[in-house]
Image (cartoon, rainbow, N blue to C red):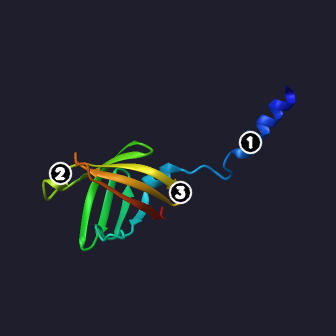
Amino acid sequence: MKQFIFISYFLLLFSCKNGKPLNVESFRTGTFEIPADDNKSFGKTSFTRLGNLQIEQYGERTDSLFIEWKDNFNYTLKMLHPKSALDKEPIRVRITGVKANSYNFEAIVGHSNFKQKGTVYKISD
């Protein structure tokens, strides 16, 4: 019985992923980039997060958004100065995968069924 417990513990120990755990909270502040998608449905976006503020630059446009984190994998963005009815709708974002300096996401604007998918890359702290 002791051998079974030892072997089970040994297998469990070495079946776990090596390396330090990913810090999802590191995506709450810093400078980030979303590259243009292959379908050309959106261009490159750069943004900086400072506390609950996200400042985005894409093309010639700059927008400021309020960011509210629901948990480590879900947050909502709201335009601070909406210019259209669509800008008034919240953007719900769900993080679907995490790597050391990037995460995959799905975003839904308002109550639509359209999901935008992409990858956010952290450029600096």
Please name the residue that numbered disc 3 is placed on. 99
Question: Please, what secondary structure does the residue beneath circle 3 have?
Answer: strand
Question: Please, what secondary structure does the residue beneath circle 1 have?
Answer: helix
What amino acid is at disc 1? Leu
Judged by depth in the image, the label closer to the viewer, 2 or 1, is: 1
Q: Nearer the viewer, residue 116 or 62?
A: 116
What amino acid is at disc 2? Lys
Q: Are marks 3 and 1 in contact (CB under 8 Å)?
A: no
Q: Nearer the viewer, residue 123 or 95?
A: 95
Please name the residue that numbered disc 1 is placed on. 13
What amino acid is at disc 3? Lys
Please name the residue that numbered disc 2 is placed on. 88
Q: Position of residue 10 (x, y in %)?
A: 79, 40
Q: Earlier in the sequence, mark 2 or mark 3?
A: 2
82 on left or right of 97: left
Image quadrant holding the N terminus, namely top right
Residue at the far top in the pictured view: 1
For label 2, the crowd category at 10 Å Cα-Cα, with few meaning under 14, some 14 to 19 and many 20 or more, is: some
Q: Position of residue 121 (x, y in %)?
A: 45, 63
For marks 2 and 1, give the CA distance.
50 Å
